[in-house]
Amino acid sequence: MGMFRGQLPVKQSVVAHPETHFSWLRTRMSVERTLMSWVRTATALIGFGFTIFQFFERFNNMPGVAAPRSPGTIRLIALGLIGSGVGALIVAIVEYRQMLRYLWSPEFGDIAGVTETQRTTPAIVVAVVLALVGLMALGTVALRTAGR
């Protein structure tokens, strides 16, 4: 019996039928949709954190606006939101890759109906690019306000 991360047993006696093949495909697409949901969530967190930072940065530099009482608070909120988005996305990418490795394992070869190796999908490319953008946003906010 094969194991995935010591948690999910793979039945060796699974019979390849059209129903099981389509179940495999539905599961595969579900994994893809889950990653895309995490990409949307991470995009919102990163974007909102960066927007909050930019808004208050510009607001505080306007003439006639009093100095903030707690100047570091907005920075911490922005860093927290951006960091949460990047962290969630990294965890989602790792989970996605683990689940794909499991679904493409030899035990499911007959059910999957695919003998070739897994391919890179647009969702994972977008997720990795967004993680890099999020890291740059995190660095920008952290370095821009480091001396304050």
Image (tube, helix red, strand yellow):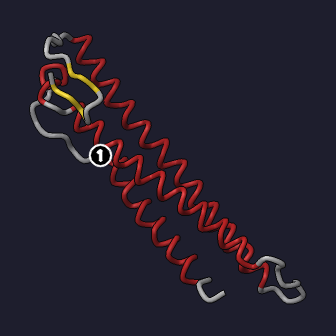
Mark 1 Cα-neighbour bin, 10 Å: few <14, some 14–19, many ≥20: few
Q: Name the residue: 48% across, 59% down.
A: 86
Q: Quadrant of the C terminus?
A: bottom right
The percent position of residue 126, horizontal first and vertical second, equals 39, 54
Q: Quadrant of residue 99?
A: top left
Q: Amino acid at mark 1?
A: Thr
Q: Compared to 104, does 71 lie above or below?
A: below
Residue 135 falls left or right of residue 75: left
Q: Quadrant of residue 71?
A: bottom right
Residue 53 falls left or right of residue 96: right
Q: Nearer the viewer, residue 6 or 34?
A: 6
The percent position of residue 13, horizontal first and vertical second, equals 14, 11
The percent position of residue 2, horizontal first and vertical second, equals 16, 26
Q: Name the residue: 17% across, 12% down.
A: 14
Determine the secondary structure under disc 1: loop
Q: Compared to 103, does 87 lie above or below?
A: below
- Tell which residue pokes out farthest to the front in this image: 6
Residue 130 falls left or right of residue 137: left
- Tell which residue pokes out farthest to the left in this image: 115
The percent position of residue 10, horizontal first and vertical second, equals 21, 22
Q: Compared to 66, does 118 lie above or below?
A: above
